[in-house]
Structures are given as C-alpha cells and as structure tokens.
Image (cartoon, rainbow, N blue to C red):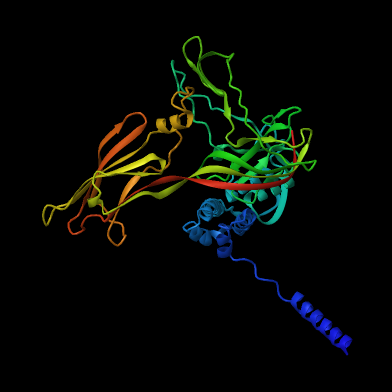
Amino acid sequence: MGRLIAAVGACGLGIAFAAASGAAPPPPPTPAGLAEQLGSEQFAEREAASAALERLGAAAIPALRAAANGSSPEARDRAQALLTRLTRLSESRARLAARRVALEYRDVPLGSALNDLRTRTGLNVTLDPLRVENPLRKVTCVTGELPVWEALEAFCAAAGVREAFRTDVDVPKPSSMRRGFVPPPAAPGAEAVPVVLIDGAPDRLAGTRSGAVRVLVLPAAFPGHRVTLGTGDLTLALDVTPVPGLGWQEVVGVKVHKVIDSEGRAGGAGTEKNPTPTHDPTGTVVFARPGVALRFDANGNSIPPESLPNARVVTVPLRLGTPSARSLKRLEGSVFAEVQVPNQQLIVVEHPEKRLNAAFEGPGEVRFTVLEVRAAPGPGGLGTVRVQLEHPSDFGLTARKRGFNNFGWPEAPRPGGQGNRVEAYDAAGQPLPAASSASTSFSNDGTFLTHTYTMTFRPGQGLPAKLAVVGPKLVTVEVPFALDDVPLP
C-alpha cells in the first residue's frame, strides 16, 4: 500500500510538472520595465536592458523619456544616450524615406528611357557620351515598385551600363580671364555630383540602397582606397550619394560598429592618415593647406585648380584582425551628415515687451535681441517693435570649418537658400501680420552680419505676444549600413 501511494504521488508530481512545462511562457518585458532595469545594480542586466531597448527602436522612446527624468543617475545617463540615438534614427528614417517607382520600359531607346527614369526618380543620372557606344539602342526593363536606388540598379542591369566612379570632379573654367585673383567656382556638393553611366556589365557592389541616401563600398580597384601592407591598416572609400532635394550639406563622420574579416576575426575603426602636400610643381605656391594650394603664373594671373575632391567619396579608416584578409564577412556602421531643413523656428521669445535688450541664442550661432516694444501713441497710431538679428556671414561659416589661420582657396559661397526672418504671433498663437517691416540698419564685421528691423502694427491689432526667428536649421541625420561579403582593395 505504501508503494502504491508513493507511485500515485510520483505520478501526480509528474502530471503537475508536465502541466507547468506546458504553460504559456512569461510575457516579454515592456519598454517601461526595460527602462527601469537600466538602473539595476548588476552590470550585465543594465547592458541587456540597453541592448533590448535599442532593438525596440522608436517604440522605446516614451519609456526612455520617463527614465531620463528618473531618480537613478545610472538610468538617467543610459536613457538619455539611448533617447538621443533612437530619436535621431527615427527622425532620420522619416526624413530620408525613399520614393518608390515601378519601371516599365519595353524596347525604348536607352537615352529616352534614362530621361524618363531621371524625371520619375529625381536622381541626377546621365550618360557619358564618350563611353556609351549607342544611346539609341533599345532597352527593356520591367520591375515592381522599388526604392529609387534599387530601381537604378535594375535599370543598369537591363541596359548593360554601369556606373563610373571618380575620386575628383572637374572644375568649370572661369569665364573671366582678367589679370589678378579670380575666386574659383564653388565645390559641388554631393547632391550636385551626377551619377555617370557607361557601357559595361554592372557590378553588384556591397551597399545599402533602401533609403534616399545610397551607401556603397567602392570597387576594390578604386584609387581612393589606401592600404598599408602587412599592418592590417586600410582606408576604405565609400560612395555616399543623397537623392537631390534633401538639403544635404556634408558628411560629418562615419562610425564603425562591427568589422569581421574573412577569417572570422574582429577588427575595428582605424586612424585616418592624410599627408600634407609640401609643394606644387605647376605654379608658384603662395598659401597651402591640406589638399589645396593657391597659385599664380608668371604674369600674376591666378591658376584655378583643374579638379576638386568628389564630395560623394567618404573615406573610412579600418584596422583588420587579419592583415592578409581579402574581404570582410560583415561591416556595420553609420554615416552621419548634416541636412538643411527650411522654415524652422530657431528662437522663440514670449512676451517680448518683458524681454527687452536680452540676447537669445539659437542654432547656427543665430542671436536675437528685442530692442523696443512701443504701444500705439493714440487711437489711430501704429504699434512699433524694433529687433536686432545676428548670424554668421558666408565668410565666417567657411572660416569656422577651415580654421581662421588655415589659408587656401577661399571657396565661393554656396547658395544659402532661405535666409532668417522674424515672425510675429498673437496671444492665440496665430500669425500677426505687420503693417510694415523694414531693415533700418546693417553691419558686417567680416564674420557676423547684424540687421536691425523695425516692424509696425495697425490700430486695433495690438502688439505681438510672441516673436520667432524662422529660418533654415542644420539637422544631423544618421544613415546606418550593414554589409556582407565586402571585397577589400
């Protein structure tokens, strides 16, 4: 009897265990729970929570905002770092989303098909007339909906053309040949450098093409790569090409997250090595800086450069785990760039009548001061607001990038697009149109422009409850890339 009871008990335990093992798994941790775990006493738990929140992406942003204001210093620091990155990634994806197109060319002349492709995608793409034998040959290319860069790839494969990559771009010759210094033309930005197609079977280069910014590893034979033999140090050249119209300014950096070579060994980011030229054999060097020299001929005429660096080519230094590796199994990282976004509120001043002569600073070194707010003197009079707006000049912006003592070719100002302006709003937040707005004074000390504006408001309007400086704003965007089977130079 005792053995029977024991057997029944064992059976019951087995049934209970089976029931327990068949139970539904616990629900996954919520973003709020993971954010709370950022302040754990265990380092491994904090790291795991950070990784899990980063994988969640934009869904984790509300929980991270709450954790960034919490009581735990460790959780606050980790939450703020994650919040900055995930917010930038989320905004970048929205800002850099690619247009999608479907191609349907059936026996269409190559030139005509390319013109239509350029119109529909917005890409700055052209044929090299010297390296395309017959631009009238017929092309058939039918696809479903694709991002514009994938559509271009499909078109090249169907048309038997490939892209020609260059380390530099030609500089247009100046129209004036007058004696003395002639400023060179502006260096074209990445949006202005065309995608040039030539005859030949296209290579499927490692890259990302799903967004409005294409990132490619340039062919192994591209002259922009640099290798230090036997050390594992190399500089990999990327082609970073934005779709025109993004307001793309320049690449400010590339961060490498993972490097795994063909032998399975991990590497990492390296150190850039840029040799400074010591002389220029084609003329008399007056000033020099890395890569650029200002030269004059025997008659005193300036000699403009014949080419300028291609703004689409971005170099990335790497250190390989295996110096003799010929390819990378995996390369992950992000390209960071500045994009100019128009019509952004840079500075907002509430109750300007209470903020007289106080300087407010905004992005891009913009400064704004309310000098005077005067009510209408009588029933039919005009209210008056006088303000001062300061911002860097074109020369000042160039000097800040290059360094005030780093001489060389002074770049011609690039088109600035839209300037800054002052807008007025009433207490309900509605625009308050001014009866008149005029610049009453202007000064330029070489690095900063200072404008004084006087705005008047009609009888019965009242005075503005809010003033805002509106203009273009530089925004940092992030373009992540994850590439497999990357050939090395």
**Residue 330 visible in the displayed image:** yes
Most distant residue in the bottom direction = 1
**Is residue 108 shown to the viewer in this render?**
no
- The quadrant in which the C terminus is found is top right
Q: Tell which residue pokes out farthest to the left in this image.
A: 378
Looking at this view, name the residue that lies furthest to the top.
298
Q: Nearer the viewer, residue 86 or 77?
A: 77
Of residue 174 and residue 473, the one placed in the foreground of this image is: 473
The part of the image, by quadrant, that contains residue 322 is: top right
Residue 230: name its quadrant: top right
Q: Could you tell me residue 394's position as x and y percent?
A: 41, 33
Of the pair 37 and 27, the residue shown nearer to us: 37
Q: Quadrant of residue 109?
A: top right
Residue 289 spot, x, y in % from top left: 52, 22
Q: Position of residue 278 (x, y in %)?
A: 58, 16
Query: Is residue 50 depicted above or below 302 in this figure?
Result: below
Q: Quadrant of the N terminus?
A: bottom right
Image coordinates for residue 18, horizontal then vertical, percent: 79, 78
Number of numbered labels in the structure image: 0
Which residue sits at x=43%, y=16%? 180
94 horizontally vs 260: left or right:
left
Q: Is residue 18 above or below residue 489?
A: below
Question: In the rendered view, would you say 335 is above or below 377?
Answer: above
